[in-house]
Each structure stands twice: as structure tokens, then as C-alpha cells.
């Protein structure tokens, strides 16, 4: 009988790719059923990460500006609608009978927090803190499914110090609620990828994706990309593929159609809102004009509003926009790509400056509004806009982490390729490209919250891979080979 080296066995236990009580075979990307108490072992670390997050959140909370605390430019509109719903039980306002261009799901959450916990700002923050904690659990579940139990601990820690989650939990904005819905969708969708028997996961994923549209209609068109992955993964006849794909799409449109029906009854308009048109004509187009004319987007936006009679009159601006599109298509593509870059590489420290600084809302904090050499612009972007030394230090650390994280994400993608997990690689790429791509109208770090959770999970995978590769001399495949030799010898 051939005995297994005990050190190899310990190494295998430490480095095995466990996901949700399963070990993933890298060669086939198929789950191998094994018993595990991973869920129990994740609970205590999750509590520790929640405590770290809470301590950092309290520190930020104690530093928040006294002038309109917890508010950014969009906050007043959400609070106004939430107040109306809280007081009257309806969104109808006889003084403003038209439908707002933004979705009303977030004001519903605010009013719900007020009904449950009292009409205070802290009630909203407690609800968002709860959603942030739940996001931690989902992120850890994702990391465990992708990389293993060890990586889930790394992902949980990265979440606990993530500036995006720390900052937007304190803002009265849609980001935490929207990112939670998208994260839950992504977690359930990938659960389906790992076990094609979990059809309920698929239905829940698309239903939650539909709910996210009620908060912000970002995923309105992603449903078609997600449905394509259903077609690719459903096993059976073409009829079965068609039937299940139609079923999940119906799950998506169930809350969307319900919301549109509400808008028809209350506002007389059968639509989710006009946010896409507002973004195109009154945010993206001013950026294009500012780039061409050497002015600012605020100046160009004011000019367009004058042209539109002081309101969002799309018909007045549309001819002007499409003339520009025909004359300067490459300029428009350039500006759109530039804004995508802002979303992908922008710093949450800019949002932190607004949160803790006095009268910083709407101030020009963008990197592209800086002047000087490249290095001077980088330094100015990181340090300007605040007098707090700790905020500058946080901005510098985030800038360095952004560079390091990009490297870690590339490693994680390499691991997908190495394992031949093409489905996961393609889905992650499509998800990030879509939700980054739709921010081309006016990019900023705030919009990255729609896929920040995935970047955390990928970075955790990259860190786990680096630690595993640099601290050990034999790979997982070698371990499996040795185990196979041992088991084969033991049979004899």
C-alpha cells in the first residue's frame, strides 16, 4: 500500500477549491459533492468584517458635514417623493402631476424605513447599513463559489474596508439599494451556472433584476444578455430552452409591468421613466459640447435648458443632438469612452470629500477638470477638494489600491482561463462591460457601485491565487494527481 505524505494531505485541505460545500474540478468546471461546514465557518468572520465596517462607518459618520448632512445633488428629489408617499400614501402631487424622470423604488424604501423606524435620517441609514451587511454575506458566498472558502474571507475583508460601500451607506442615494439588488441577481445567476438543477435560483435572479429597475432602470436592457446565458445553459430540446427563457423573462417583467401600471394609474403615463433620455440629451450632450467648445458641461447644460424652455423638452434638443452625431460621431464615441474610464477608475474619495466637506456638492472634483502635467493632475485630483489630512491619505491609498486591484483582477481572469471556465469569464465580462458602458453619458465612481461587488470578488481571487502560488511549490493539479496515485495504490 502506498501512503500519502501527511504534509500533502494538509496542503490539499488548505488549498482545495471549495464552493458552497462543493469542490470545483478546474478541468471540467463541474461540482464534486463533498461534505462541508463552510457556511458555519463563514459566520464568525462575517461578524468580524461587519464590526470593522461598523467602526469605520461610525468614524465617517462623526466627520460628516453639518450642512445638509448625508445629501448629494439627487437626494432632495428622493426625499421629496418619499415625504409625499409617507404623508399621503401616494406619489400623486396635484401641483406636479407629471411623472418624475427617475424611478420611485428608492423613495418607497425611504418611506418604508420611516414607517418602521421613525421619520429620521438615521432610519434610512440603518436600512442601508442592513443592506450593506447582507451584501457582505452575498459577496462572501460569491467568492467561496468562485475561489474557495479562504478567498471568501479575503473578499469579506475587502468589503469591510471598501470606500464605496462605506461612503454610500451614509448617503441618501440609490447606490446601496441598487447594488444589493444587482448583487443578489448575480449571486443567484451564478448559482445556476454551478448547478443547473437550481431553476428557482434563475427565476429569483430575474425577478430581483426586474426589481432593480424600480430603483434605477440601469438593467432594463441587460435582461436580454442575461436571457442569452439562459439559452446557452438550459439543457434539453429547443422548445425547453425557449420555454424556460420566456419564463425567466416574464419574471423580470413582472415587477416592471407592475410599476408601469402604477405610473399609468397615477401619472397617466405607461413607462418606467425618462431617465435614459435625460441622460442622453442633458448630461451626455453637454459633455460633448463642452469638449468641442472648451467650456464646462454645466454651462452647456444651461444653454440646452434655455433652448428647451427651462424643462426637459427632448423634442427641442433632439434635432440639435442628432445633427452633432452625424457631424462628429468620433467625438461622441471619444467622450462616451472617456466617461466609461471615469466610472472604472474614478475614486470614491471624491464622494467622501462631498460627504464630509462643507458646500462641496456639485463642485468640480473630476480628474479631467484638473490642469497641469499628468502627475500634477493626479495629485490635484487625489488631494484637492478637502482640508482634512485623513481624507487626502484615504484618497492616496485608494489611488494606489486601484492600480494594484487592476493587476489582481487580471490574475483572476487568468485563473478562469486556466480552469477553462469560459461561461463564468464571459458572464463576468458581459456584466462589467454593460454596466460600465451605460455610464458613458457622465461617468463617475458612484456608478461603479453597480459592479463594485464583482471587482471585490475578482480581487479576492487574485490575492488568493498569488498567496497560493508564492507560498507553495506544488500546484493543486499536482496534489490531485498525488491523491489519485495514493487512492489507486490503495485499491491494490
Image (cartoon, helix red, strand yellow):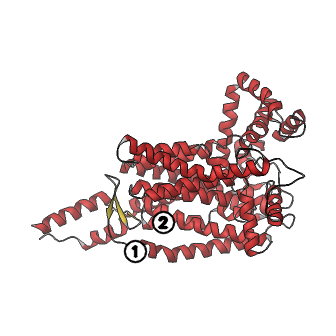
Residue to which mark 1 is pinned: 37
Q: Would you say the residues marked 1 and 2 are in contact, meaning their CB atoms lie under 8 Å apart?
A: no
Q: Residue 145: x percent and y percent?
A: 43, 61
Residue to which mark 2 is pinned: 152
Question: Is residue 13 toward the left or the right of residue 399 in the image?
Answer: left
Q: Residue 288: x percent and y percent?
A: 76, 33
**Does the image show residue 61?**
no
Residue at the far left: name it.
Answer: 492
Q: Which class describes the residues within 10 Å of circle 2: few (<14), some (14-19), or many (20+)?
A: many
The quadrant holding residue 442 is top right
Q: Quadrant of the N terminus?
A: bottom left
Regarding mark 2 in the picture, which secondary structure is present there?
Answer: helix
Residue 239, numbered label: none
Q: Residue 154: x percent and y percent?
A: 50, 66
- In space, the residues marked 1 and 2 are separated at their CA atoms by 14 Å
Q: Which class describes the residues within 10 Å of circle 1: few (<14), some (14-19), or many (20+)?
A: few
Task: Classify 269 as above or below 289.
Answer: below
Q: What residue is shown at x 75% (from left), y 50% (from top)? A: 265
Task: Classify 114 as above or below 210.
Answer: below
Task: Classify 284 as above or below 169.
Answer: above
Mark closer to the observer (1, 2): 1
Amino acid at each position: 500500500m502506498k501512503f500519502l505524505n501527511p504534509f500533502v494531505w494538509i496542503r490539499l485541505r488548505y488549498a482545495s477549491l471549495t464552493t458552497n460545500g462543493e469542490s470545483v474540478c478546474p478541468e471540467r468546471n463541474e461540482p464534486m459533492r463533498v461534505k462541508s461546514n463552510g457556511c458555519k465557518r463563514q459566520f464568525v468572520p462575517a461578524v468580524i468584517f461587519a464590526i470593522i465596517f461598523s467602526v469605520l462607518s461610525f468614524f465617517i459618520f462623526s466627520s460628516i458635514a453639518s450642512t445638509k448632512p448625508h445629501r448629494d445633488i439627487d437626494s432632495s428629489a428622493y426625499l421629496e417623493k418619499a415625504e409625499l408617499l409617507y404623508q399621503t400614501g401616494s406619489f400623486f402631487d396635484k401641483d406636479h402631476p407629471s411623472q418624475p424622470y427617475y424611478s420611485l423604488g428608492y423613495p418607497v424604501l425611504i418611506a418604508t424605513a420611516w414607517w418602521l423606524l421613525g421619520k429620521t435620517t438615521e432610519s434610512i441609514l440603518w436600512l442601508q447599513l442592513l443592506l450593506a451587511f447582507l451584501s457582505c454575506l452575498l459577496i462572501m458566498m460569491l467568492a467561496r463559489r468562485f475561489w474557495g472558502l479562504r478567498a471568501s474571507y479575503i473578499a469579506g475583508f475587502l468589503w469591510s474596508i471598501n470606500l464605496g460601500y462605506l461612503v454610500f451607506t451614509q448617503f441618501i442615494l440609490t447606490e446601496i439599494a441598487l447594488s444589493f439588488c444587482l448583487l443578489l441577481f448575480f449571486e443567484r445567476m451564478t448559482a445556476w451556472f454551478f448547478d443547473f438543477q437550481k431553476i428557482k435560483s434563475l427565476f429569483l435572479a430575474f425577478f430581483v433584476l426586474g426589481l432593480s429597475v424600480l430603483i434605477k432602470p440601469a438593467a432594463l436592457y441587460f435582461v436580454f444578455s442575461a436571457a442569452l446565458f439562459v439559452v446557452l445553459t438550459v439543457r434539453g430540446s429547443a422548445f425547453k430552452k425557449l420555454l424556460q427563457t420566456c419564463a425567466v423573462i416574464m419574471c423580470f417583467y413582472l415587477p416592471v409591468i407592475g410599476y408601469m401600471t402604477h405610473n399609468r394609474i397615477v401619472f397617466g403615463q405607461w413607462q418606467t421613466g425618462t431617465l435614459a433620455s435625460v441622460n442622453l440629451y442633458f448630461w451626455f450632450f453637454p459633455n460633448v459640447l463642452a469638449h468641442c467648445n472648451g467650456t464646462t458641461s454645466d454651462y452647456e447644460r444651461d444653454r440646452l435648458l434655455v433652448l428647451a424652455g427651462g424643462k426637459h423638452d427632448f423634442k427641442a434638443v433632439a434635432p440639435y443632438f442628432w445633427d452633432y452625431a452625424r457631424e462628429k460621431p468620433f467625438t461622441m464615441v471619444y467622450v462616451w469612452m472617456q466617461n466609461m474610464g471615469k466610472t472604472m477608475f474614478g475614486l470614491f474619495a471624491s464622494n467622501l470629500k462631498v460627504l464630509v466637506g462643507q458646500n462641496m456638492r456639485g463642485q468640480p472634483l473630476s480628474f479631467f477638470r484638473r490642469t497641469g502635467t499628468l502627475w500634477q493632475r493626479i495629485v490635484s485630483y487625489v488631494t484637492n477638494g478637502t482640508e482634512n489630512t485623513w481624507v487626502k491619505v484615504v484618497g492616496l491609498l485608494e489611488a494606489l489600491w486601484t492600480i494594484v486591484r487592476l493587476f489582481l483582477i487580471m490574475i483572476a481572469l487568468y485563473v478562469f482561463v486556466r480552469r477553462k471556465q469560459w461561461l463564468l469569464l464571459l458572464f463576468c465580462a458581459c456584466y462589467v462591460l454593460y454596466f460600465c458602458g451605460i455610464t458613458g453619458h457622465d461617468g463617475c465612481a458612484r456608478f461603479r457601485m453597480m459592479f463594485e461587488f464583482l471587482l471585490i470578488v475578482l480581487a479576492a481571487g487574485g490575492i488568493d491565487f498569488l498567496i497560493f502560488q508564492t507560498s507553495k511549490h506544488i500546484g493543486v493539479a499536482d496534489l490531485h494527481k498525488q491523491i489519485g496515485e495514493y487512492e489507486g495504490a490503495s485499491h491494490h
